[in-house]
Amino acid sequence: MKNIASVVLCAVLAAAGAALAAEPLKAAGRTELPEYSGDFDHFAVDLAGNRLFLAGEDGGTLEVFDLKSGERLKTLKGFEAPHAIHFIPATNRLIVTDSGDGLSKIVDGKTYAVVGTVKLTPGADVMSYDASRKRLWVVTGGKNAAAKLKDVTVSEIDPSGRHFGDLKFDTDFTESIAFEQKGNRAFVNVSGKHYVAVVDKATRKVIATWPVKEGENNAPMALDEASKRLFVVTRKPFRLVVIDTDTGKSIASFEAPKRTNELIFDAANKRLYLAGDDYIAVFAQKSANDYAEVARVPSAHGAKTAILVPEAKRLFVAVSPGDGKTGGAVLRYDVMPNAGL
């Protein structure tokens, strides 16, 4: 009997150990922001300076955290509705898109003083960086502008704020942008018209449009260039859609968390992380055509923007309290490697 009991116990422990090892994300801490109300938007990171930045969209602030401990270091005021942040290591400066009439800001990373303004169409929101060309594409105008413009303008700038040109879309709602690094295409989620625009980066001309038939308001986006797969999340209903970038055709779709506002491709572990209400959905990429949801990691209501910091093996998620009086928070998760990696 003792031998049987020992065998059973060993089997239970082995199963528990295997389950623990298979956890894609492990909760590592939570930083409370008790006075905050409204929504947060997107993150940025300064690896050398050990800093994490978060746009306080509804609070008109930029929040600064210690990247390792999660401690809040500073709250910067003077913004109207900040959305996206790009940190420039070479100059220790940040570009912060601000949809207010005061336009987007250039911030000194040492003094935190506003040292410049990016003079684009009002209503700046989404900002994506193309490392291959060292350029930023900024979505302006549309519904985020105070005047509620009918068109969206996507402006190409460099990290100094120099303006190179524009691309317009006949909609008031355009969201995420992803760039090929070996190819010459950009992918733009034209959310108000429910399609992906394929753009030649050199000319800023639309060369193809791919309708997203699984849902409307396609917003978050991620790209796996090596596997030729583009990932988008629709909001009506909330669905993850996998698109072949050779053909523009969708090859799979899955349920996504409600109010998903961040979609991240983890190239090292071949995973997708979808941050939305109450949980982070984790999908495994078994091959370019084979995906499976492998975990629903508990988070919080309103935990819908996130950033993966591969160098730190950590995922950060912002909890937006909305109109509630619960306060905000930043959640930290350790990214666990796949078995055999």
Image: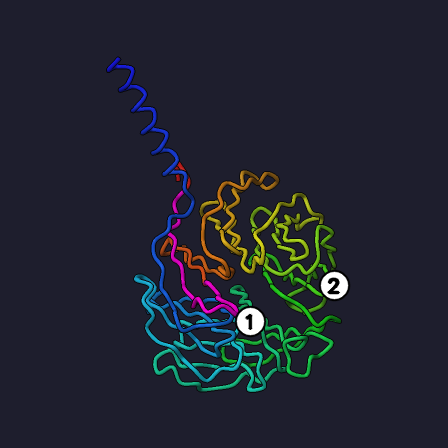
Q: Is residue 221 left or right of residue 72?
A: right
- Rate crowding at label 1 as few (under 14), some (14 to 19) or many (20 or more) other CA atoms within 10 Å: many
Return the x and y of residue 204 as percentages of the image width and height. 68, 69
- Rate crowding at label 2 as few (under 14), some (14 to 19) or many (20 or more) other CA atoms within 10 Å: some
Give 112 or 305, whichever is nearer the viewer. 305
Tell me which amino acid carries mark 1.
Leu
Q: Is 255 above or below relative to 100?
A: above
Return the x and y of residue 298 as percentages of the image width and height. 45, 50
Tell me which amino acid carries mark 2.
Lys
Quadrant placement of the C terminus: top left
- 198 falls in the magenta region: no
Q: Mark 2 and mark 1: span between their CA atoms?
A: 23 Å
Judge whether residue 185 can be spotted in this image.
no
To which quarter of the image does residue 338 belong? Answer: top left
What is the number of the mark on residue 193? 2
Q: Which residues are magenta?
A: 319-337
